[in-house]
Every structure is written in C-alpha cells, then in structure tokens.
Amino acid sequence: MEITEQETEGKHPTDNYLTVPTGLTQGEFEVLKRFVIEHHTYPISSGQCSSLLAQRIQAPLDIVWSIVRRFDNPQVYKHFIKSCFVKEDFQMTVGCTRDVNVISGLPAATSTERLDILDDDRHITGFSITGGEHRLRNYRSVTTVHGFEQEGTIWTVVLESYIVDVPEGNTEEDTRLFADTVVKLNLQKLASVAEGVARDCDVDWQDALIHSLYCFLFVNGTLKM
C-alpha cells in the first residue's frame, strides 16, 4: 500500500517493531520483525492510535491463508459480523468493497470496507473502512500470515495491525482497548476455525491411508474378508 508525502506530513512512523506482541516468543518475533517494519508500520499523528496483535495457530499456512484471504466471507472468523454483502458481479481484486452488518450491542451498525491489498504470494491482505454507521473513522488494517517449521512441527503466526482515529470524547487508551479486543477475539476464532480444518484434513488423510492399506492387504491375499 503506497503512502504519499502528503499523508506523512506532520506524522511519525509507528514503532510496533519494538515490542514483542503477546503470545509470541522472542525468537518468533526476531524472524517476523522485518515483516512488521515493512507491512505493519504506519505514519501516525496525534488523534490516532495503532496496535499490532499476533496469534499462533497450530495449522499449516495454506489452511490459515485460505480463510484470511476471503474478503467476501469475513464472518467465518470475525465474531461481530452478522452478515456480509458484495455486488453480484463481485471479483476479489484490490479496490473491491463489501458491506458488513454488525451484531447488536456494539457501537456500530454497518460498515463499508475496501480491499487495499491481496497478495497470495506473500500472504498479505488489508482493508480500510470507507463508510457506514460506526465510530472507527479512517480505520486501516493489514494482516500477514507466516509459516513456521521446527523439528517436524508446523505452525502459523498471523500478524494483524491497524491504525484508526480516536473518536471525539474518547481517549487513545480506550480506543486501543476496544479495537485490540475485537481484533484479538477475531484472531482467536481464526485459530479455532483453522485448527479444526487442519484436524479434519488429518482425519481424512488417515482414513484414506487406512483404506488404501486394507485394499492392498486384501488384494494381495494377506487379509481375508
């Protein structure tokens, strides 16, 4: 996402790369720090707040990314979305939009959101809120998905950052607490959904393997039916 000189005037870059997000090890963050600097740094001014959150998921990267990239179906893992609508001729490309209805009980009713980036090679996506009835003015978010493998164990780390205006009458701390809570709950549900898919894939693979083994033994006369 390109940022113009006008957008950075009177602003300073966020320093999300300085603090290890809750839930990550120092080692994981050292690997991810360059991605934080490149993709999760925003020009910020007074009257705005920003944050970076992380979620470790016990599932392969491709499963997690297949869920995260679905701009047209965010309710799969986003807790507070009641429904999502896209145009009839919708194509998931940069610049497309979605209209989201939010569940009752939140300081929002609807949200119109624009897809800012979708990179299937680098596993990066991001959106901005462009309209609707809500209090998250000038909200922009970036999500990156990172695969890890060590000693035969595979897992994925998802990083999600945002920048948003502080609403009039609210403090920066209150705004960050609210936004952090929403993002954190969404990431936790993403982990639950992705890990469930991964377990189902494992069961399907094991069932197929057992079936093939039984067929092999039966064909070769080792197993009598």
Image (cartoon, rainbow, N blue to C red):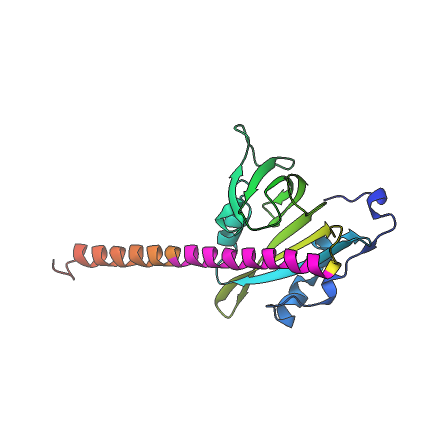
Q: Quick one: 162 or 18, which is closer to the camera?
A: 162
Image side of residue 213 versus residue 53, left or right: left
Determine if the magenta segment contains residue 188.
yes
Residue 112 visible, this angle: yes
Q: Position of residue 186 (x, y in %)?
A: 55, 55
Q: Residue 90's spot in the image, x, y percent?
A: 55, 31
Query: For the point 29% across and 57% down, which residue is it?
Result: 207
Location of the N terminus (image quadrant): top right
Q: Residue furthest right?
A: 10
Query: Image quarter for residue 38?
Result: bottom right
Which image quadrant is residue 197 in?
bottom left
**Is 154 situated left or right of 115 in this image?**
left
* Residue range corresponding to the magenta coloring: 173-199
Q: Nearer the viewer, residue 123 or 171?
A: 171
Count of marks overlaid on the render: 0
Evaluate whether residue 158 shows in this view: no
Q: Is residue 97 magenta?
A: no
Q: Residue furthest left?
A: 225
Q: Which x, y percent locates residue 145? A: 59, 55
Q: Main secondary structure of the magenta part?
A: helix
Whether 4 is drawn above or below 143: the answer is above
Q: Residue 66 location in percent, x, y?
A: 51, 48
